[in-house]
Amino acid sequence: MKPVNSLLAATGTTIFTVMSALAVAHDAINLGQGFPDTEGPRDLLDAAAAALMDGRNQYPPLTGVPELRQAVAAANRRFYGIAADPAEEIVVTSGATEALAASLAALLDPGDEVVLIEPLYDTYLPMVKLLGAVPRLVRLAPPRWDLPRAELAAAFGPRTKAILLNTPMNPTGKVFTEDELGFIAGLLQQHDAYAVCDEVYEHLVFEGARHRPLMTLPGMRDRCLRIGSAGKTFALTGWKVGYVTAPRALAGVVAKAHQNFTFTTPPNLQRAVAAGLAKPDAYYAGLAADLALRRDLLAAGLRRLGFGVLPVQGSYFITADYTALAAEDDVAFCRRMTEQARVTAIPLSAFYAGAAPQGFVRFAFCKRPEVLEAALARLAAWLPALTPAAASA
Ligand code: PMP
Ligand code: GLN
């Protein structure tokens, strides 16, 4: 038989699924895959249920129901002062995952170069390669994750079509500074390139940090495709409703990609998300404040146990350094922690294409406080049995 697609055949199952399955097998507390352990807002669930029963269940419009496109445009204006035409500059997709794929497909021809920043989310590299484009990887280094400007500049060249920028960033919890964004904007102008901006954690930003979309910087309005996700904004990760805001000329091509990938997204969920985006500012402030408390609870607990805890300004995730506790690699450590402590995390190396910095794992803190406490108690009971020497034996 002829071989199937070589890239997909060689791609393993995503680390999130692998670790969640291991967590289930060992009855572990799953602080691996990033999903809340409570339902999203009750009024959104009610709105989705009502929207299922009122007779609008056939194909919705290709680029999204008008209510949601208007709500995305209104949110762009309310939070960032971005003016976007709901008819021609917004495309609703089946999650940010599809938005990323459609945005990359809209921009890239085979052979185009795309600048990617490691550590990176797991779909970025396969998507770029599937499109026949060439990834140019630049690394941020722990513990500060500062943008290495000279290396970034060196990754840009005449064939650069785009950068893929994730801020607030998974897995590091970094929020790019205005200064860093300004530097990236300068490179995009210098090289006539675009930015696909993965901003799914836009509302999960903690005190002291501020998320500023690259699209709002001077000269960037026509170069950026800005991606959001209802999954993160409303703690409903299974809904898979995403949205792209882009200049007219690009949004039309994103719509062509969407028409070929999925064509539409379930209309009742779209209508509920439209209601969600109109929630008052207090909802958004509460979302971030509540998550910050959970971050603080888990960070303090991990620190007490001897983990090094890296600073987190946004997202669902803490990166922790376990080298004072064990000497094995991060994959082995996460496996053993799941099997023996019955707490699951994600090895940071999963977010790198090549050899990764060792000794770090990612914990998700988007869980109920009592669940975080229980995980810490399990770790506290397990860790005394570990020493670096014992771990490497
Ligand atoms: N981008 C990043 C950085 C993510 O962490 C995730 C996972 N939540 C996604 C995209 C995918 O979002 P969605 O579930 O809306 O497809
Ligand atoms: N974004 C989630 C995470 O980083 C995972 C999403 C998925 O499992 N595909 O944990």
Image (cartoon, helix red, strand yellow):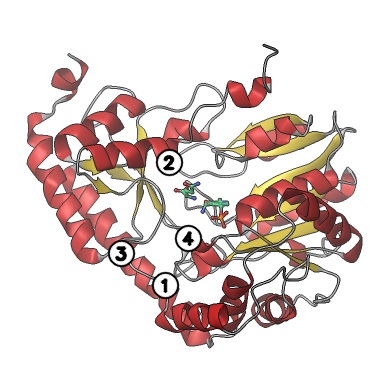
Name the kind of residue labelled 1 in the image: Gly
Label 4 CB less than 8 angstroms from ligand 1 = yes
| Marked residue nearer the N-terminal end (3 or 2) | 2
Asked whether residue 184 appears in the rendered view, the answer is no
Contact, mark 2 vs mark 4 (Cβ under 8 Å): no
Label 2 CB less than 8 angstroms from ligand 2 = yes
* Tag 4 secondary structure: helix
Residue 333 at x, y percent in the picture: 27, 29
Residue 16 — which label?
Answer: 2
Name the kind of residue labelled 3 in the image: Arg
* Tag 1 secondary structure: loop
How far apart are the alpha carbons under marks 2 and 4? 13 Å
> Looking at the image, which residue is at 39% across and 74% down?
289
Mark whose residue sits in front, 1 or 3: 1
> Looking at the image, which residue is at 57% across and 65% down?
202
| Residue 344 against residue 83 in the figure, above or below | above
Could you tell me which quadrant the C terminus lies in?
top left
How far apart are the alpha carbons under marks 3 and 4? 18 Å
Name the kind of residue labelled 2 in the image: Phe
How far apart are the alpha carbons under marks 1 and 3? 16 Å
Image side of residue 237 versus residue 114, left or right: left
Quadrant assignment, res 219: bottom right
| Residue 137 against residue 244 in the figure, above or below | above
How far apart are the alpha carbons under marks 3 and 2? 21 Å
Contact, mark 4 vs mark 1 (Cβ under 8 Å): no
Pointer 2 local density, CA inside 10 Å: few below 14, some 14–19, many at least 20:
some
* Tag 2 secondary structure: helix
Contact, mark 1 vs mark 3 (Cβ under 8 Å): no
Residue 240 at x, y percent in the picture: 56, 60
Pointer 3 local density, CA inside 10 Å: few below 14, some 14–19, many at least 20:
many
The residue pinned by badge 3 equals 294
Residue 353 at x, y percent in the picture: 57, 27
